[in-house]
Amino acid sequence: MLTIGKLGSSTGVKIPTIRYYEQIGLLPEAERSLGNQRLYTHKAHERLVFIRHARDLGFSLEAIRDLLSLSDNPDQPCAAADAIARAQLAEVESRLARLAALKTELERMVVQCAGDRISDCRVIEVLSDHSQCITDHAIEDATS
Amino acid sequence: MLTIGKLGSSTGVKIPTIRYYEQIGLLPEAERSLGNQRLYTHKAHERLVFIRHARDLGFSLEAIRDLLSLSDNPDQPCAAADAIARAQLAEVESRLARLAALKTELERMVVQCAGDRISDCRVIEVLSDHSQCITDHAIEDATS
DNA sequence: CTTGAACCTATAGTAGCTAGAGCACTTAAA
DNA sequence: TTTAAGTGCTCTAGCTACTATAGGTTCAAG
């Protein structure tokens, strides 16, 4: 049985994050020691590794919840898991396309400043005027 | 003078977002009509266009705050603006690299399921075991 | 004058954590 | 055996950048 600290260091997940996952029901409630400290089994370790890996691949906690419940029922068809992964791939692809467009604009913006004063600054100028852009980069949310 | 609705539709920024920008000091407090409704000048319109465009390019509100204050002082050197844009470019590039790695893994994962049951599902299997990945995709945060 | 659209404020909710306060427990050295 | 460091506990609030809802006010058209 692992303490939360050991579990955290062995999976690379921070302690408050582990408690958070328990709180939102992604991890089952841990057993407790006599002194009320959480104790984790090998199974819990595996589950957290799964979550961590899926997070690293950009899956949302919601998607991970679904994947975990699929994983808990090994006799079900795997089409659902496949669909979740495909959806994630599609999202990654769309973010890639968007970021590529952003990169183009930012590179153009940054190449050089015409003068050395803000009044001549190409960065400020381009930001003030979208028509100076060559791509249509304003489609979806910018955090992608 | 524009009402908040007109300002929103002419810039593509939602009304609550405009009020939010005012609240956090990104937009100055708007003048009010006799009936207490916000009224915007052409200058405010320009400022919001600037903000919107920078958001579209992925700049954080914090970075935009800095860019706006630079833009308000046109006699200053533009090195600072340049640095902000370069930092944004660097971040976009790093996200691109990361997403490209994610895409590789997701594609590999999705290519096919060996069986049709979860117990044979490649998606679930790979998520359980990072050593099946060919790239080191676990570097920074996954929302990028 | 009335109706309906557009506006107002204030509060709470979203994702996915992270940080802090103020305690209790555990472990290893002195 | 004590004691100090380290680790753990709960609870609350904060982060980004909005978005949604409730309940009320004002404006413009008919």
Image (cartoon, coloured by chain):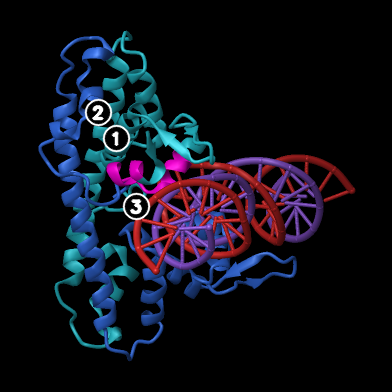
Chain colours: A cyan, B blue, C red, D purple
Image quadrant in which you'd find residue A36: top right
Q: Which residue is mark 2?
A: B128
Image quadrant in which you'd find residue B87: bottom left
On residue A143, the disc is: 3
Query: For the residues tagged 2 and 3, is the chain the same?
Result: no
As shown in the figure, which amino acid type bears the numbered disc 3?
A: Thr
Q: CA distance from mark 2 to mark 1?
A: 7 Å
As shown in the figure, which amino acid type bears the numbered disc 1?
A: Val
> Quick check: B121 left or right of D14?
left
Image quadrant in which you'd find residue B46: bottom left
Q: CA distance from mark 1 to mark 3?
A: 26 Å
Per the picture, the main secondary structure of the magenta-coloured stretch is helix
**Residue A13 within the magenta-colored segment of the rendering:** yes
Looking at the rendering, the stretch of residues picked out in magenta corresponds to A6-21
The chain under label 3 reads A
Mark 2 vs mark 3: in front: 2
Q: Which residue is mark 1?
A: A49
Give residue B63's position: percent from left, percent from top: 36, 70
Which circle's residue, 1 or 3, is located before the other in the chain? 1
**Residue A113 position (above or below residue B15):** below
The chain under label 2 reads B
Query: For the residues tagged 2 and 1, is the chain the same?
Result: no
Q: Secondary structure at mark 1?
A: helix
Task: Categorize mark 2 by other alpha carbons within 10 Å: few (<14), some (14-19), many (20+).
Answer: many
Q: Residue at x 38, y 46 (%)?
A: A5
Mark 1 vs mark 3: in front: 1
Q: Residue at x 74, y 70 (%)?
A: B34
The chain under label 1 reads A
**Residue A66 position (above or below residue B27):** above
Image quarter where the N terminus of chain B lies is bottom right
Labels 2 & 1 near each other (Cβ < 8 A) = yes
